[in-house]
């Protein structure tokens, strides 16, 4: 059954069934009355058959009430001149017409319905009850009109809510994508600083070998070893940069370099800084051989701790934060930061984008990150690779 038009949403099966039920119930009511009258007056058979036939025809025409709204409304209204059983389908068709909210269609059909009531009253003979029937019919027609406008208002409201929800979802997806791209650009920027540092160091070491003629064999081997190690580190950093920038749509490396980025060696200063600002932080640092931690991993670790502390300040201001750092070469580096989770806290627009950025950073570093509320505390747990 086709209940879809250009201006109206499709109906569900239950909606279609409800509309046909509303049309059939009056038909059954009048059908019972007509059957009783027919049993008393057999000569009403032809009139009864015509009435029921027109009613069934109106019920069938309901199928196209949305495709041909005013045409079907006109036909069913005219049928009610000769058929009381057509009244149920005619009422459903009229309400469907009103939901279109096109007054150039509604007003003529409404006037025709009122004229039909007057014609029926004249046909049956004017008496005191005729005026009551006309008034009741007019009020009922007005009620159907108001009900149709109410249905249209509900549909418009539901459509606007769906559109608002879709727009909000699209906006959130765009914010998340922007956060990912911004984090990738930040990583590329940090790698740019390190690569520039290492390449300049290689240039200086190579220049020393080219122009210094007073170096001993042991010193030459030491400089060559330093060049080899720095070249190896440069290749590793370059692979990370290329992996970051290879993602489609990621911005390129900024042209202007910022100051060198902090590493895990600076995390102590970070804790001192936030404490000086009033944030209460308890630290459990059990990282072994941190001097062997690659600078790239150290930068990621610093940023994770920094964002976790920022997140705690935003969502649980004044609460005590616990930061746990541990790991060793071969086992990886673990960062666990937790703080009380205020009940009923809801992230506003742009909320959780810092966590999205950390997830992207950790993924690019080859690590894992998770965050959840456990026993009333928000816990952020990150693991970064640290090869022996």
Image (cartoon, rainbow, N blue to C red):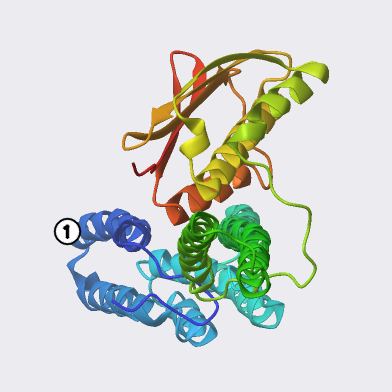
**Quadrant where the N terminus lies?**
bottom left
**Quadrant where the C terminus lies?**
top left
Disc 1: which residue:
39
Residue appearing at x 52%, y 35% in the figure: 291
Residue appearing at x 34%, y 78% in the figure: 63
Q: Is residue 32 left or right of residue 108?
A: left
Q: Viewer-proximal residue, 329 or 44?
A: 329
Query: How far from the left and from the top, in percent, is residue 57?
Result: 30, 80
Which quarter of the figure has residue 126?
bottom right
- Relative to 44, say whether 216 is above or below: above
**Residue 231 in sight in this render:** yes
Q: Is residue 103 left or right of residue 161?
A: right
* Count of marks overlaid on the render: 1
**Residue 124 in sight in this render:** no
Which quarter of the figure has residue 332?
top left
Sort mark 1 into few (<14), some (14-19) or many (20+) by Cα contacts within 10 Å.
few
Query: How far from the left and from the top, in percent, is residue 172?
Result: 60, 55
Residue appearing at x 78%, y 25% in the figure: 273
Query: How far from the left and from the top, in percent, is residue 44?
Result: 25, 71
Q: Secondary structure at mark 1?
A: helix
Q: Viewer-proximal residue, 80 or 304?
A: 304
Query: How far from the left and from the top, in percent, is residue 36?
Result: 22, 54
């Amino acid at each position: 059954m086709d209940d879809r038009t250009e201006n109206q949403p499709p109906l569900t099966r239950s909606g279609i069934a409800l509309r046909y039920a509303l049309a059939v119930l009056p038909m059954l009511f009048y059908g019972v009355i007509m059957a009783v009258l027919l049993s008393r007056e057999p000569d009403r058979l032809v009139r009864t058959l015509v009435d029921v036939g027109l009613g069934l025809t109106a019920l069938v025409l309901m199928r196209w009430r949305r495709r041909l709204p005013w045409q079907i409304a006109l036909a069913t209204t005219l049928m009610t001149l000769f058929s009381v059983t057509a009244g149920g389908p005619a009422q459903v068709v009229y309400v469907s017409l009103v939901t279109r909210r096109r007054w150039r269609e509604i007003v003529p059909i409404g006037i025709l319905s009122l004229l039909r009531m007057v014609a029926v009253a004249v046909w049956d003979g004017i008496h005191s009850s005729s005026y009551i029937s006309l008034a009741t019919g007019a009020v009922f027609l007005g009620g159907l009109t108001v009900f149709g406008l109410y249905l249209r208002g509900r549909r418009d409201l539901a459509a606007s809510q769906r559109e608002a929800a879709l727009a909000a979802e699209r906006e959130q997806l765009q914010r998340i994508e922007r956060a990912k791209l911004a984090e990738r650009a930040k990583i590329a920027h940090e790698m740019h600083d390190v690569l520039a540092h290492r390449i300049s160091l290689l240039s200086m070491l190579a220049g020393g070998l080219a122009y210094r003629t007073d170096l001993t064999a042991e010193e030459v081997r030491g400089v060559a070893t330093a060049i080899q190690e720095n070249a190896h580190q440069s290749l590793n950093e370059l692979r990370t940069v290329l992996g970051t920038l290879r993602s489609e749509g990621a911005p390129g490396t900024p042209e202007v370099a910022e100051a060198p980025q902090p590493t895990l060696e600076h995390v102590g200063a970070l804790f001192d800084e936030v404490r000086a600002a009033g944030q209460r932080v308890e630290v459990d640092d059990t990282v072994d051989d941190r001097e062997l931690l690659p600078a790239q991993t150290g930068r990621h670790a610093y940023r994770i701790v920094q964002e976790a502390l920022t997140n705690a300040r935003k969502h649980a201001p004044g609460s005590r934060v616990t930061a746990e750092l541990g790991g060793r070469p071969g086992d990886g580096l673990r960062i666990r930061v937790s703080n009380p989770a205020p009940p009923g806290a809801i992230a506003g627009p742009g909320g959780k984008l810092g966590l999205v950025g950390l997830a992207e950073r950790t993924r690019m570093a080859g690590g894992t990150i998770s965050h959840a509320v456990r026993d009333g505390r928000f816990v952020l747990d990150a693991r970064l690779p640290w090869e022996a």
